[in-house]
């Protein structure tokens, strides 16, 4: 609609794709750790989160089904099937939430967004009840003639 008015002078380079790739990898590692922690918690082993130095290195073990990978002194852990099931549940929830957030962001800030739209407060101020009362003789001249004074 108004794309011809706005020109982006900054060329797209490698920074944005790198940020997206890093965010996806970080989110993937977080999903793996969260799925494993939920599996252990529901299996009765308690809520365990790995130390920061084992956080990324334990991901291959978690994907393989080892619920104790990177966790110190865990006695009761969930089985491999429970870990995979919780990884699938948390992964699907994350993909769904990420998709909804991306669609919302694309509509809000993407190239097809509406530019120059008033906020809700501005619209209420301009088109609200007070404004309509002030211009009632213009909006409905049959009900409120210009010469007639009405108290609100």
Image (cartoon, helix red, strand yellow):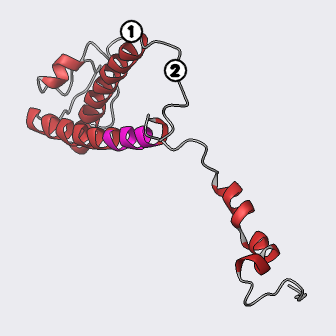
Residue 65 screen position, x and y as percent? 12, 27
**Residue 14 - label:** 1
Q: Please identify the residue farthest to the left as the structure is shown.
A: 81
Residue 148 image position (x, y, % from top left): 88, 89
**In the image, is residue 45 part of the stretch drawn in magenta?**
no
Compared to 128, does 44 lie above or below?
Answer: above
Distance between mark 2 and mark 1 Cα atoms: 16 Å
Going by the image, does 53 lie left or right of 41? right
Magenta region, residue range? 99-107
Main secondary structure of the magenta stretch: helix
Q: Residues within 10 Å of mark 2 (few under 14, many from 20)?
A: few
The image quadrant that residue 105 belongs to is top left
Q: What residue does disc 2 label?
A: 8
Q: Between residues 79 and 128, which one lies in front from this camera angle?
A: 128
Q: Nearer the viewer, mark 2 or mark 1?
A: 2
Q: Which sits in the foreground, 111 or 42?
A: 111
């Amino acid at each position: 609609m108004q794309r011809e008015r706005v020109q982006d002078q900054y060329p797209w380079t490698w920074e944005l794709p790198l940020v997206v790739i890093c965010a996806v990898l970080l989110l993937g590692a977080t999903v793996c750790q969260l799925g494993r922690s939920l599996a252990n918690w529901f299996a009765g082993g308690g809520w365990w989160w790995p130390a920061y130095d084992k956080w990324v290195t334990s991901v291959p073990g978690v994907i393989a089904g080892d619920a104790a990978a990177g966790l110190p002194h865990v006695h009761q852990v969930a089985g491999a099937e429970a870990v995979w099931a919780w990884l699938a549940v948390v992964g699907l929830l994350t993909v769904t939430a990420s998709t909804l957030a991306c669609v919302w962001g694309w509509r809000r800030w993407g190239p097809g967004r509406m530019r120059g739209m008033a906020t809700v407060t501005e619209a209420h101020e301009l088109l609200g009840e007070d404004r309509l009362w002030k211009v009632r003789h213009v909006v409905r001249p049959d009900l409120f003639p210009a010469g007639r004074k009405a108290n609100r």
